[in-house]
Amino acid sequence: MEILFFVYLSSGLFLGWSLGANDAANIFGTAVGTRMIKFRTAAWIASVFVVLGAVCAGGGTTATIDALGSVNAVAGAFMVALSAALAVYWMVSSGILVSTSQAIVGAIIGWNIYSHKPTNTDVLSVIVGSWVFCPLLSAGIAMVLYWLVKLWLRHSKMHLLRRDSYIRGGLIFLTAFGAYALGANNIANVMGVFVESSPFAAFSTEWLSLSPEQILFLIGALSIGAGIFTYSNKTIKTVGKNLMSMTPVIALIAVFAQSLVLFLFASQGLKGLLEAYGLPSLPLVPVSSSQAMIGAILGIGLAKGGRGINWMVILKIAAGWIATPVIAASICFISLFFLENVFRQIVFQ
Amino acid sequence: MFNVKISLFSRAKTLENKIDVFHDKVIDAAMTFNKSMHVYLSEGRCEAFKKVNKQLKQIEHDADQLRREIESRLYSQNLIPDLRGNVLELVENLDKVINRFDEVSYQFYIERPEIPEIYHSRIIDLTGQVTECAENMSIASRSFFRDFTLVRDYSQKVYFLEHETDLTSGRLKEAIFDSDMPLANKLQLSTLVDEIEKIADLAEDCVDELLIFTIKRDI
């Protein structure tokens, strides 16, 4: 059973690889694109912190994915993850920035339709609502940050070289924070559908204790790391150069806004704290780091008066947002039919 | 990580100092040039003039050394990757002005022009304007590194002074050619006036580029 599980898990790992190739570029793409950090340094920091984020804080968003459609057969989970991965891979290789979150949600809906299971519309509306809110929130945060940073730079009269040192330090910190937030928020996309059929037992030593879910997240996070190292360089060229001419300060603001948004949508601790004080909190939903990044860049662009934004690239990306779930759902529906009727696998129970 | 951060800040600090010293050299060169012209006009090619010329050569030599150090540090330590091309260009432009001060003063030393006393005050005016122009260029350039809102103010002064030098040199050349001096002397003086005036032109070119760099630096 375990060997077969790993064969089925391969699609999740492929999706993790796609996520690393695509979404990690949002975190350090601008820093590498502006030559503030070397690719290899950024890739190492991001990989380590993606693993930490996924293992330590990946549970919250996984519960949301599970509530949307509880994929209860491992062969079905395999196909859901594979369909999402294929959709993402196809769009990444076409040079379009896509959302892994939308691909997995599309694929789960495809599974729900195929297995005649009802899609939890309340959860779906929360997820879709968060997709809309995520870039808007990111844009708002980025705008405020832009004005604050501009004000500070104007009044601090800091030397250009010292400013460069601070920015470089900030970008290294934010690569770590962004990767942590990405791991925490997006691991549900990669491994969420396998949680129900996971065969792992809890692992515990004197200094480390991992639940079965966390072991699954660790494996998924390692595949994200592989994606970061092997393919994210290509997507960096889209984020860092095509969208808008970015200075390192702009890169810093954009990455900070994006990482903060990802963290807000993933942090169980923050949600608990806000709720304890009776304050409104954000749902724990896997959101798109691409959307958050585009939102942040758009926010900065608007704060600057709307100049320098390549609207055609944004339109191209927006088209990808709509196409990704539709493509993933279609691939999933058709593939499940073949998996069940040609390969005689149980795809739902 | 802490060590990396500390070394990054100390490297930046060292280079900051070098850039500051380089700007000081521009002002030193301008003041020394002004002094050399005063000495030449009052005493001709005397010992004092030779000494001032030597001083100017030393400033030019030190500035060259600093420029090379700044350039190599910017690249070898991968500092301000987005702006280092601009900074290099700026430093080279400033260095051209320093070189020009040295060359013009040396030209006076070599050619030993005979300058009738009636032109002395105008040459002093011209030299003063050129000196002020270069000083303002240096302040504008220094502001680029700390407070770019000032770049525009000082650039405006450079433009104004450059225009003034054009007028002063024009009037001076007109007076030279209206005089009874032999044509060879007229041509020699006119060329030297042009050489002095070109320093202000160089400062203007430098400031033109500086303003473009400032727009790029603005977040």
Image (cartoon, grey):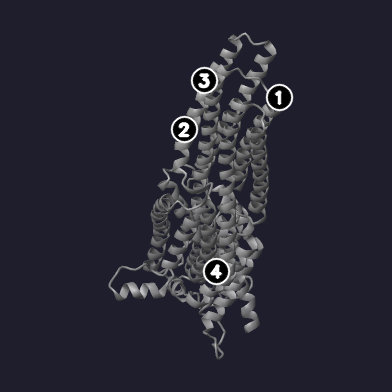
Tell me, yes or no, whether dots 3 and 2 are on the same chain.
Answer: yes
**Gap between marks 4 and 2 measured at Cα:** 65 Å
In primary-sequence order, the first of circles 3 and 2 is 2
* Circle 2 Cα neighbour tier, 10 Å, few/some/many (<14 / 14–19 / ≥20): some
Secondary structure of residue under mark 2: helix
**Circle 3 is placed at which residue position?**
B167
Label 3 crowd bin: few (<14), some (14–19), many (20+), radius 10 Å: few
Q: Earlier in the sequence, mark 2 or mark 1?
A: 1
Quarter of the image that includes the N terminus of chain A: bottom right
Of labels 3 and 1, the one closer to you: 1
Say which chain tag 2 marks. B
Q: CA distance from mark 4 to mark 3?
A: 79 Å
Provide the secondary structure element on which disc 3 rests.
helix
Q: Position of residue A158 (x, y in %)?
A: 47, 53
Report the mark closest to the observer, 4 or 3: 3
Q: Residue B99, image x and y in percent?
A: 65, 36
Would you name the residue on which mark 2 appears? B156
Q: Nearer the viewer, mark 4 or mark 1?
A: 1
Q: CA distance from mark 3 to mark 1?
A: 25 Å
Residue picked out by circle 1: B111
Q: Check disc 4 and give the amino acid type.
A: Val
